[in-house]
Image (cartoon, coloured by chain):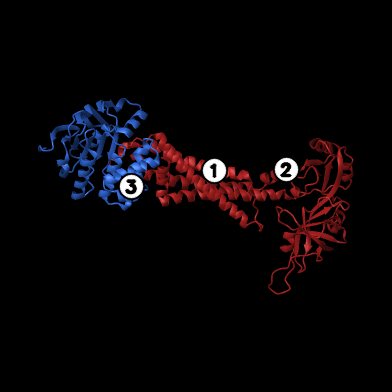
Chain colours: A blue, B red
Amino acid sequence: MNGQSTAAVRCKSVVKTYDTGGDKVVALGGIDLEIHMGELMMLVGPSGCGKTTLISVIAGILDQDSGSCEVFGEDMLHMRSNQKLKFRARNIGFVFQAYNLLPSLNAVENVSVPLIINGVKRQTAEYRAAKVLEQVGLGARGKSLPSQLSGGQQQRVAIARALVHDPKLIVCDEPTSALDHETGHTVMELLKDVALHDDRALVIVTHDSRIFGFADRIARMDDGHIDKVVDSSDKL
Amino acid sequence: MNHIALKMLMGDRGKYLGIIMGLTFASLIMTQQPAIFVGLMSRSFSFISDLGLPDIWVMDPKVQFIDDVKPLQDTKLYRVRGVAGVKWAMPLYKGLLKARMADGTFQTCNVIGLDDATLIGGPPVMLEGKLEDLRRSDGVIVDIDGAIDKLAKPSKIKGGKPEPLKIGDTLELNDKRAIVVGIAKTTKTFQSQPVIYTTYSRAVRFAPRERKMLSFVLVKAMPGENIPLLTRRITESTGLAAYTQQEFKDLTWGYFMKNTGIPINFGISVTLGFIVGAAIAGQTFYNFTLENLRQFGVLKAMGTSNWTLLRMILLQAILVGLIGYGLGVGLTALFGYAMRNTIMAFKFPWQLLVFSGFGVTLICVFAALISIRKVIKLEPAIVFKG
């Protein structure tokens, strides 16, 4: 952990169920979790244990059924949809497993998207995007389309996109699972060095045990619950 | 976000071109077919339009359209002349007569007989000779299309191109000699038969003798006369039908609309063009949206509102609509230009631009609506599914 211990995310008794054709599936069965500013928290666990549902709730993409999930002191459940969108656009950055870059936009344009969503003019947005691309080591590939980049490069563009609007929380879904060991390691180093600092928190969902060492804390989930939260140096 | 919407659209070249092709096809069919229809229907009354001088056409009350001639007694002309408010009234003969060609074949022609003294009702444009030349013995004026095509003389060289009829050439009309004294330009008529102008007395001589020979009486109203009132007065005092030029055009147009299959045939073509265009463009646009659903999901997850996404889709629909519409209309204009000197009927009034524009707009709205519905209902959480 990088110092501060102010809570970026505070989940209390978060319950989320899905209705699958009459059957209720409990995806989150009363989650309590705190993620601090300056902290890199990993959510790990088997498939279907509720990791993705939990980050979706944290990111305000899904509404919990009950309980509270405050992000920087605000529970998005109680926000109107427009407020929620603005909150998400301003405060949260996303890194996805499948990169999810827009294929017809070049790297600079892809990175500039969050700024444009936040109302920044295109020219300024692209200028700032180019700067962040330099930070992630892709300054020379700004004009390249995603299809012209390797998987690792695409993930670095995705990281730049998550950082460009300077969000306070970055949510990463399996950021290394599509990458080989070396590239995955590089991407994690980049996330830790460039993305993480005292007034920002990172929450990473992963299966990839090779990157557990990058976490400040690891929350192990199983069947919609958090079994335990440990420091990365502890054995899970 | 507009440039992102446009880049998303144009990034998928295949689909982009597919949507545009569908809309171009729809726009082309919805413009070109009605243009042919309007052109064809305009020909039904082109003779009335060409004959611009009279204010009123007087005829037998049973006449249904311009070519439905029901001859009147010559005395009717004098009765019309006697109606108050009539400045002048002139006879007009209009009938189909067979012309015998130099090679012995026959060609049916539309023979127009003009008042001998005034020659009122003559062709709108003289290309060769003068209208007054009709006063020469056996003189006739032939329309240019007829002269170079259906009335053309066989080539002197075997297998050569037929030679256009020219001034000085002779024709046989109902076994009577006619000498070409002029070539005129007329608007093509519905039946596309050659048009031959001559004097009334000569036309009556050419035509097989009947008790009644007068086809129409052309009337000019006194200056300041209320023309609709005058038509009523003529009808009341003569028992004949009297129409203003526009009314007679409408009567002719109405007859063709009601009594021929033309509107139905063209209506089917236009409807099919609309349906096929809507199906191609709508389906391709919908598929395009479906394939980009994840991208829309990413934008939604990152904080883009439904309203912004809706605007993006509308912008995409408007762009492809405008391009497709422009190409369709442009191709129609090119078609019209290429066909300008052929027998093909083609008329492209501005109202057709509005008509096909409305059709393309409907297709785009339909395509956008089905896509928008999908995007609005989209759960942004799909972005977390690998």
Query: Which numbered marker is on residue A107?
Result: 3
The reply to whether discs 2 and 3 touch (Cβ–Cβ < 8 Å) is no
Number of labelled discs? 3
With A41 as the anchor, is B156 left or right in this view? right
Residue for point 73% across, 69% down: B154
Where A218 falls versus B117 (above or below)? above
Q: Are marks 1 and 3 on the same chain?
A: no
- Spatial separation of the CA atoms under disc 1 and disc 2: 29 Å
Residue at 72%, 45% in the rendered image: B252
Q: Judge whether B300 appears above or below B138 on screen.
A: above
Judging from the image, what secondary structure is the residue with disc 1 in?
Answer: helix
The amino acid type, in three-letter code, at marker 2 is: Leu
From what the image shows, is residue B307 above or below residue A178? above
Residue B316, by quadrant, is top left
Specify which label sits upstream in the sequence, 1 or 2.
Answer: 2
**Residue at image mark 1:** B359
Distance Cα–Cα, label 2 vs label 3: 67 Å
| Chain under callout 2 | B
Q: Position of residue B245 (x, y in %)?
A: 76, 43
Q: Amino acid at mark 1?
A: Gly
Left or right of residue B18, residue B239 in this image? right
Quarter of the image for residue B378 reads top left
Give neighbour class at mark 3: few <14, some 14-19, many 20+ (Cα, 10 Å). many
Q: Is residue A228 left or right of residue A53?
A: left
Which chain letter goes with mark 1?
B
Local crowd at mark 1 within 10 Å, few (<14), some, or many (≥20)? many
Q: Which mark is residue B251?
A: 2
Q: Kindly report the distance in space between the C-alpha atoms of the residues bearing marks 1 and 3.
A: 39 Å
Instruction: Identify the secondary structure beneath mark 3.
Output: helix
Q: Are marks 1 and 2 in contact (CB under 8 Å)?
A: no
Q: Residue at x 72, y 48 (%)?
A: B45
- The answer as to whether the residues below labels 2 and 3 share one chain is no
